[in-house]
Image: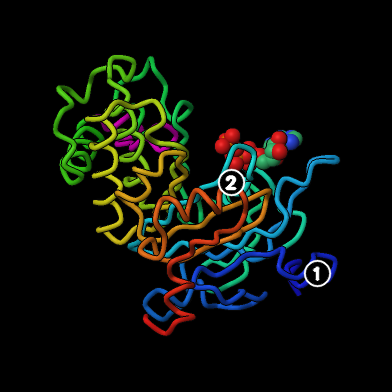
Amino acid sequence: MTPADDASRPAGAGREAIGGAEARPGDRSVSAAGSGGPPLLELRGITKHFGAVQALDGVDLVAEAGKVTALVGDNGAGKSVTIKTVSGIWEPDDGQIFWEGRPVTIAHPNDARDLGITTVYQDLALCDNLDIVQNMFLGREKLRHRLLDEDEMERTAKATLADLSVTTIRSIRQPVASLSGGQRQSVAVAKAVMANSKLVILDEPTAALGVAQTEMVLSLVRRLSDQGVAVLIISHNLNDVFAVADMLTVLYLGHTVASGPIADFDSQVAVDYMTTGRSARDHAAAARTTGTE
Ligand SMILES: Nc1ncnc2c1ncn2[C@@H]1O[C@H](COP(=O)(O)OP(=O)(O)OP(=O)(O)O)[C@@H](O)[C@H]1O
Ligand SMILES: [Mg+2]
């Protein structure tokens, strides 16, 4: 029994599957959008409180391999707390996390790492005083005869950046402090790739970036998902979301109010869900009820 079954939550206060029909606990319609097997990651009915603050109150979320899932919502909606439950920073009070269809407990960041989950935080991801190679191998340095294998680490770092078509970095031996915001973000993503991540979570990766740098990071996100990685991206910028996401999940006051393929939303519908928790202009729902879809 998941907390989403909790009768104390008023009917209709939960999420709406975009498309009009109300999604029920255990309803797999959200996750069924993919290739048939269980999704890589699924959150069902996640709740989390801090003292009197109910930060999460029924979060349902799916992230599938090879897809970019955008998690949006207003300030304080619960986006960061949600990804922190997946990253092993906070344990949920209730609800269940499924990984490849199996229930898992992610009680510590090491648990997340062992599953293949990497979270890229915009500002905290890299050490300014270290160079690119040192950053990419921080905590996972390669050794040879008990000494750092610098050549091998350089080769791997270079190859990873090249694979991701990150071409604007002049030297992988330059300190990260000397990189632009977009380049830093690219290095952080490349680090996640090197960790052989199955799920890469990006928290506001373009928040501080200019137009060109944003493009660069978004195309990197695209390439990452093209390589089969599940990408979960938090963003305030709906232009970015519509440019890069395959799936969209909207949180409102700590619970999921809409979830589905990005094509089922337009920016007005997304804004409606983000600001009021509902949308009178849900085109997919309208199409379905009139049988035109
Ligand atoms: N460590 C904490 N202690 C107490 N309350 C917290 C803590 N972290 C988050 N909260 C509360 O949980 C709620 C959700 O916060 P969260 O940081 O997830 O929002 P968000 O959707 O990421 O917002 P933003 O877009 O502003 O980053 C907020 O009411 C916030 O005040
Ligand atoms: Mg946040």
Amino acid residing under circle 1: Asp
Q: Quadrant of ligand 1?
A: top right
User: Which residue occupies the foreground of this view, 22 or 43?
Assistant: 22
| Residue position marked by numbered label 1 in the rendering | 6
Q: What element does badge 2 sit on?
A: helix
Q: Which residues are magenta?
A: 138-150
In the image: residue 27, left or right of residue 163: right
| Disc 2: CA contacts within 10 A as few (<14), some (14-19) or many (>=20) | some
Amino acid residing under circle 2: Thr
Q: Quadrant of residue 279?
A: bottom right
| Residue position marked by numbered label 2 in the rendering | 275
Circle nearer the viewer, 2 or 1: 2
Q: Position of residue 216 (x, y in %)?
A: 23, 36
Residue 80 shows up from this direction = no
Q: Point out which mark residue 55 bears.
A: none
Residue located 38% across and 64% down the image: 65
Marks 1 and 2: in contact by CB < 8 Å?
no
Residue located 47% across and 55% down the image: 269
Q: Is residue 77 above or below residue 34?
A: above
